[in-house]
Image: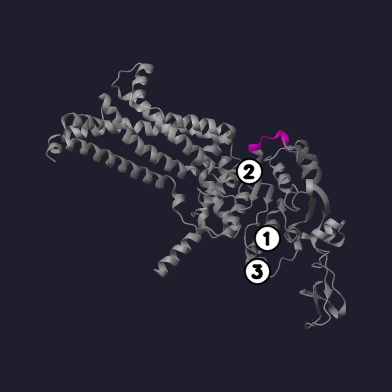
């Protein structure tokens, strides 16, 4: 569990990036911090591994005040995945993945063996191990970034807009992989994004942030969608634009008991099962969250 | 060519002496420029001052320097050490800026990611920032190498060993062939040394040789179209 207690960050020039922020991030769940650029979400994330130290307030990991932990050691125990992968360009893939274990003193041979196994975990071919990052595609680099974040088997994985720089198709792939990994590995994931769809897809808990890292709303995607507490949230999640306000189409009639749903713009958004004209209800839990029709290639359909 | 064949031993001797004087300054200036470049990168306000002071070393005329150094450190006027020190100063003048620029050329994302992984500052410098500054450092040291090998001949004016002696001797005796030999050998040494540095760079920085998929695609495309 990670706990923020009245955490503020004020820069020397007077800007308050984070203002009295308090939050409990539960263990073994994915918490997504979502907001527009400049809302302080990345600053919050970087406070967890002390890349940024708060001006006031306390951050605790499992009850321990992290300001008492030496930053270099803390960082080796917290996985970090960033945008543009942040891979070390002068190290081969395998060395990149093995970086943290080797820093922690694991013998090189052992670290390399573990790194190869991790490539399997993130769905990369072992033949890529001897390549340099520049020889990989953006999506592959990002997977290596995730493998590296997991290499020291940390309890906490911080992900800073990790899929922001890849194309939409690869992004969908990587998001699904992230869901699969989370089901398998059960880490405490803190994920930062500006993409609300990504937040709703990945988050067990979603925190919508306004400027100064003020929490506009927090809750499960279902709770937020059902009851946006403010104009700002409604706006942010797109409820007002009708993108998420779906209606049963009056013209299209698929076979069987399905009904076609259209959004407010009249565009087909999907189908919903309605056996005997009765709408089906689901009781979604994060573990069962459906992750599109591409899951078969991840081997868990 | 008669003169050359009659003096092969002496020419070889001068070449070796030349190398003995020219190599230490190249290595020393590379090493000494590292902390200077680090300071310039670490403390941006001091950057201008540090690099300007270092560059000013290059403005000191070499002959007076070669006379002042023995006075300061108490060596003889013809001691090769004087040339080594003078050329090291010139090397630093060139290399400090290259080192600072090289360190600054490291992608901030990579630096941050290294910090996030848990590198200590010292390890991060040597394992990440220094090697990634490599291509710029290499460009710098190649200039230093050529310039040092050529400047080493200045010692000849004071009778300090090296290929410079072929110039002074050749001028005094009006032997054009001797002067030409000196020039050619200096150029040959410079080219050989430059090649060695480039090879060393390739060996030490294998990642700079790999092309990104985009570059490979472009290259294949060109291969197809031509």
Q: Are marks 3 and 1 on the same chain?
A: yes
Q: Position of residue A274 (x, y in %)?
A: 84, 77
Q: What residue is drawn where x is 39% and y is 29%?
A: B88
Which residue was labeled with disc 1?
A: A175
The answer to whether B60 is drawn above or below residue A93 in the figure is above
Q: Position of residue B22 (x, y in %)?
A: 33, 32
Which disc number belongs to residue A104?
Answer: none
Kindly indicate whether the residue at mark 1 contacts the one at mark 3 (C-beta within 8 angstroms): no
Which residue was labeled with disc 2?
A: B116
Distance from Cα at disc 3 to Cα at disc 1? 14 Å
Q: In the image shown, does A253 or B60 lie closer to the viewer? A: B60
Identify the magenta region.
A66-72
Which residue was labeled with disc 3?
A: A296
Q: What residue is drawn where x is 35% and y is 34%?
A: B148
> Which quadrant does the C terminus of chain B fall into?
bottom left
**Is residue A70 within the magenta segment?**
yes
Q: In the image shown, does A35 or A201 lie closer to the viewer? A: A35
Give the chain of mark 3.
Answer: A
């Amino acid at each position: 569990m990670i706990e923020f207690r009245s955490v503020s960050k004020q820069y020397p020039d007077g800007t308050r990036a984070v203002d009295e922020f308090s939050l409990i991030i539960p263990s073994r769940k994915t918490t997504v911090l979502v907001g527009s650029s400049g809302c302080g979400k990345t600053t919050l994330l970087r406070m967890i591994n002390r890349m940024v130290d708060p001006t006031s307030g306390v951050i605790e990991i499992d009850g321990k005040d992290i300001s008492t932990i030496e930053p270099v050691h803390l960082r080796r125990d917290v996985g970090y995945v960033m945008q543009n992968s942040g891979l070390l360009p002068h190290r081969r893939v395998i060395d990149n993945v093995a970086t943290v274990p080797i820093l922690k003193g694991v013998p090189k041979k052992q670290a390399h063996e573990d790194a190869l196994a991790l490539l399997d975990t993130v769905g990369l071919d072992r033949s890529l191990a001897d390549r340099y990052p520049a020889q990989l595609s953006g999506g592959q680099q990002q997977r290596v970034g995730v493998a590296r974040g997991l290499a020291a088997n940390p309890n906490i994985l911080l992900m800073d807009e990790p899929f922001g720089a890849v194309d939409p198709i690869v992004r969908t792939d990587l998001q699904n992989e992230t869901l699969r990994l989370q089901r398998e590995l059960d880490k405490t994931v803190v994920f930062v994004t500006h993409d609300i769809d990504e937040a709703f897809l990945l988050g067990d808990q979603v925190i919508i942030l306004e400027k100064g890292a003020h929490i506009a709303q927090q809750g499960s995607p279902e709770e937020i969608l059902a009851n946006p507490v403010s104009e700002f949230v409604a706006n942010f999640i797109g409820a007002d634009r009708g993108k998420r306000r779906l209606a049963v189409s009056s013209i299209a009639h698929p076979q069987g008991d399905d009904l076609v749903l259209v959004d407010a713009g009249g565009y087909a958004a999907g189908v919903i099962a309605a056996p005997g004209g009765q709408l089906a209800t689901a009781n979604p839990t994060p573990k069962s969250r459906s992750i599109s029709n591409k899951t078969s290639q991840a081997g868990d359909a | 060519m008669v003169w050359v064949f009659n003096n092969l031993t002496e020419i070889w001797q001068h070449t070796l002496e030349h190398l003995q004087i020219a190599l230490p300054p190249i290595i020393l200036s590379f090493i000494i420029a590292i902390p200077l470049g680090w300071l310039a990168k670490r403390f941006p306000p001091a950057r201008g001052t540090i690099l300007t002071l270092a560059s000013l070393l290059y403005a000191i005329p070499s002959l007076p320097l070669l006379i002042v150094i023995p006075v300061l450190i108490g060596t003889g006027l013809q001691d090769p050490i004087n040339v080594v020190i003078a050329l090291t100063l010139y090397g630093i003048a060139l290399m400090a800026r290259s080192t600072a620029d090289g360190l600054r050329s490291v992608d901030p994302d990579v630096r941050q990611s290294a910090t996030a992984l848990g590198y200590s500052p010292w390890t991060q410098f040597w394992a990440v920032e220094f090697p990634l500054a490599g291509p710029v450092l290499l460009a710098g040291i190649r200039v230093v190498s050529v310039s040092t090998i050529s400047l080493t001949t200045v010692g000849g004016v004071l009778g300090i060993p090296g290929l410079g002696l072929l110039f002074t001797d050749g001028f005094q005796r009006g032997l054009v062939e001797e002067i030409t030999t000196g020039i050619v050998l200096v150029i040959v040494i410079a080219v050989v040394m430059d090649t060695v540095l480039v090879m060393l760079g390739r060996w030490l920085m294998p990642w700079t040789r790999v092309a990104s998929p985009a570059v490979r695609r472009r290259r294949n495309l060109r291969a197809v179209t031509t």
